[in-house]
Amino acid sequence: MSCEETTKDDTEREMKRLKDRNRDRLNETAAVKVVHPAIVEVVVVVVVVVVVVIVVVVVVVVVVVVVVVVVVVVVVVIVVVVIVVVVVVGNHGLFTQDSFIVMST
């Protein structure tokens, strides 16, 4: 009986040791699972911030280019209008009474 009791006690101790070891492993796995989502969240936040910064920079560059193009077009239109007005006024200036006198002599 003593031998059987010792074997039974050894078996129970071994089972308890295995359960404890498995519980420790589960706790370690749970701890790793808790750490990983935090790392993933940080990476996601960094990626989102980088994407937002890139989008903002692209939008600002596009807006600046559009503003420059609009300013250039407005300046060109103003210059063309000024040239047309000067030519038309200059041509009308040819048909004044003084110019007729000069042309007729």
Image (cartoon, grey):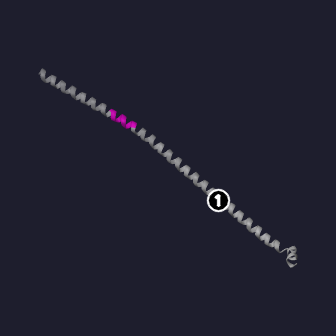
Which residue extends farthest left?
1
**Residue 29 vertical position relative to residue 101 in the rendered view, above or below:** above
State left or right for residue 42 relative to residue 24.
right
State left or right for residue 88 relative to residue 5.
right
> x and y percent of residue 39 in the render?
42, 39
State left or right for residue 13 relative to residue 89.
left
Report which quarter residue 41 is drawn in. top left
Which residue extends farthest front?
105
> x and y percent of residue 46 in the render?
48, 42
Front position in the image: 57 or 83:
83
- Part of the protein shown in magenta: 27-35
Residue type (three-letter) at the residue carrying disc 1: Val
* Residue at position x 56%, y 49% in the image: 57
* Residue at position x 66%, y 59% in the image: 72
Report which quarter residue 78 is drawn in. bottom right
Q: Residue under label 1, please give it.
A: 70
Front position in the image: 24 or 82:
82
Q: Is residue 5 magenta?
A: no
> x and y percent of residue 71 in the render?
66, 58
Front position in the image: 84 or 21:
84
- The image quadrant where one finds the C terminus is bottom right
* Residue at position x 45%, y 44% in the image: 44
